[in-house]
């Protein structure tokens, strides 16, 4: 059965690709943005454009986008994506990318690309479903990782109104490798059935503070303090029939970089046009917003280091971090 034909609630529960997730990702492929570093495309700009940090050539970006699309739409494994990535790098003679040169570096970089695109597209698709269903309450669900980020684990079960400002920065994923998610309910009883705690109806103290080292609230990695899909969720359902069952065969060439955090409006020229024309709408700006696997030592593509969070004595223990093994979630 095609991924888009699966019942959305079943697909979400099993972490399988579903129609809104696929449509969200394909809705970005009309804008392939050449970049030098991962911060060149910022937060909700990712809702309307595709990038891989350091990839600047048109056909290279097109092939990378196609490989990610197969990972999302066909449910391909990380190992399969790594195989495709290696073939693409060799085909285009791409050198100088972060992680090149060692097996560990390549494994790290391919995991970052794979996980980030799968988790943000999943989150955006779920957001569209949550909004369409009109759930009154949203419940924060921790991934259940063996070695969790303590901040993310502390939010587990938090049950808040769907329009609570907490979600603008804390709708997951909340960092590199984060696997947390949100489920919806129409009342306390429904929230409890889904693992929520109706009595946990206020975020922990300090949730809206800003860590000067990351520019985000405590527990959120730099660049992740927004709500993936927020600028696209309301239009996703109209895109599903056109995009979710339309398997790609390539993509347009890049249309140029983002300038001043606004999408360039000029159209691509001489495009390979191998993928369907997806997301032709202009890149609309949106207010800053935010936030599904939690890896406490997942690393940002440029620094290879996790961004720390505050541990001052004035903060409740709930925000503290502790040393942990290399893989955490």
Image (cartoon, rainbow, N blue to C red):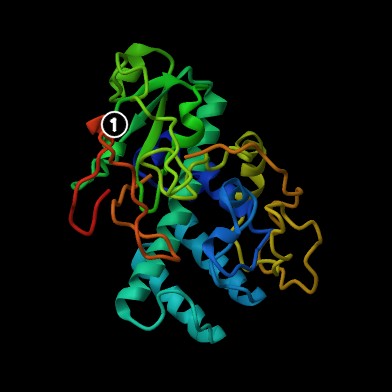
In the figure, residue 192 lies in which quadrant?
A: top left
Q: Nearer the viewer, residue 303 or 236?
A: 303
**Whole-percent x, y for residue 173 in the image:** 42, 44
Q: Secondary structure at mark 1?
A: loop
Q: Position of residue 203 (x, y in %)?
A: 37, 24
Pointer 1: what residue? Answer: 314
**Relative depth, front residue between 326 and 32:** 326
Other-residue count near label 1 (Cα within 10 Å), few / some / many at <14 / 14–19 / ≥20: few
239 on left or right of 149: right
At horizontal 40% and vertical 75% (from top left) the residue drawn is: 99
Q: Is residue 128 left or right of residue 270?
A: left
Say whether residue 104 is visible.
yes
**Can I make out residue 17 in this image?**
no
Q: Which residue occupies the foreground of this view, 58 or 238?
A: 58
* Residue drawn at the location 22% of the way across and 59% of the way down: 326
Q: Classify 132 as above or below 266.
A: above
Pick whichever, 17 or 256, lies toward us: 256
Name the spot of residue 148 as percent of width and height, x first: 24, 44
Which corner quadrant of the image does residue 110 belong to? bottom left
* Count of numbered badges drawn on the protein: 1
- Give the residue at x 35% y 68%: 108
Q: Is residue 267 left or right of residue 196?
A: right
User: Residue at coordinates 33% horizontally, 42% vertically from top-left?
Assistant: 310
> Where is residue 57 drawn, in percent x and y?
64, 76
């Amino acid at each position: 059965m095609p991924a888009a034909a699966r019942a959305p609630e079943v697909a979400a529960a099993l972490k399988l690709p579903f129609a809104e997730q696929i449509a969200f990702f394909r809705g970005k492929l009309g804008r392939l943005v050449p970049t030098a570093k991962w911060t060149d495309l910022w937060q909700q700009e990712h809702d309307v454009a595709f990038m891989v940090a350091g990839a600047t050539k048109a056909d290279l970006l097109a092939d990378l986008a196609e490989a990610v699309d197969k990972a999302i739409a066909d449910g391909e494994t990380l190992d399969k994506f790594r195989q495709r990535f290696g073939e693409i790098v060799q085909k285009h003679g791409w050198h100088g990318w972060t992680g090149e040169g060692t097996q560990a570096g390549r494994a790290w970089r391919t995991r970052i690309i794979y996980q980030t695109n799968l988790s943000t597209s999943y989150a955006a698709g779920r957001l569209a479903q949550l909004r369409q269903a009109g759930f009154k309450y949203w419940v924060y669900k921790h991934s259940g990782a063996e070695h969790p980020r303590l901040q993310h684990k502390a939010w587990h079960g938090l049950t808040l109104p769907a329009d609570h400002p907490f979600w603008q920065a804390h709708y997951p994923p909340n960092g590199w490798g984060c696997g947390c998610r949100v489920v919806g309910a129409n009342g306390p009883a429904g929230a409890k059935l889904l693992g929520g705690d109706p009595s946990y109806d206020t975020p922990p103290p300090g949730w809206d503070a800003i860590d000067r080292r990351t520019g985000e609230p405590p527990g959120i990695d730099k660049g992740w303090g927004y709500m993936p899909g927020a600028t696209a969720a309301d239009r996703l359902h109209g895109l599903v029939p056109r995009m979710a069952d339309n398997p790609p065969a390539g993509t347009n060439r890049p249309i140029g970089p983002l300038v001043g955090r606004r999408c360039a409006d000029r159209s691509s020229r001489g495009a390979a046009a191998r993928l369907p024309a997806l997301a032709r709408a202009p890149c609309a700006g949106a207010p800053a917003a935010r936030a599904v696997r939690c890896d406490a030592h997942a690393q940002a593509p440029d620094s290879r280091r996790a961004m720390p969070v505050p541990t001052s004595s004035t903060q409740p223990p709930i925000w503290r971090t502790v040393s942990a093994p290399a893989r955490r979630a």
